[in-house]
Amino acid sequence: TDEETRLERVSVEKSKMVYHLTLVHFTSWSMPYLKLKSLLYNDLKSQICNDKDAQMLLKKGVSIVYSYSDKDAKPIGSFTFDAKTCGLKTNLEKLKNLLQLNKK
């Protein structure tokens, strides 16, 4: 988080780890989803895909979600990152591949 972003909470929803964030100085009309995406998506992706702890979660089939709301608690949008986003295979996919190789 920074001076523009406040982490409200982290929740787990099935196989998703969700970071609920508030943009403390913006409203949904001043920071529409496409603008938010153009500003944050690539940096978030880079951080997640290069973080060893995040990679461990992704490989286990967990998705990491950043969910943004405006200063009035109105949803703006979210970004979901999974193993495919980072060019990784989940442990389950690796196991399936091994089993297929053993069948041949």
Image (cartoon, rainbow, N blue to C red):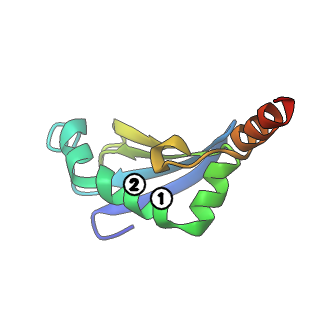
- Looking at the rendered structure, the kind of residue marked 2 is Lys
Question: How far across and how far down the image is residue 29, in percent?
Answer: 16, 37
Nearer to me, 79 or 24: 79
The residue located at (47%, 59%) in the rendering is 48
* Up/down of 3 relative to 9, above or below: below
Disc 1: which residue? 49
Q: Is residue 53 above or below residue 8?
A: below
Give the residue at mark 2: 45
Q: Is residue 54 above or below residue 94?
A: below
Q: With 101 as the anchor, is 54 left or right in this view? A: left
Q: Is residue 97 visible?
A: yes
- Pick out the residue farthest to the left: 30
The location of residue 70, given as percent across then percent down, is 30, 45
Under circle 1, the secondary element is helix
Q: Is residue 32 visible?
A: no
Q: Position of residue 85 (x, y in %)?
A: 46, 44
The image shows residue 62 at horizontal and vertical percentages of 64, 45
Residue at (61% x, 50% y) in the render: 58
**Number of callouts:** 2
Q: What is the secondary structure assignment of the residue under circle 2?
A: helix
Q: Residue at x 33, y 70 (%)?
A: 2
Residue type indicated by callout 1: Cys
67 with respect to 72 (left or right): right
State the quadrant of the N terminus: bottom left
Real-space Cα distance between discs 2 and 1? 6 Å
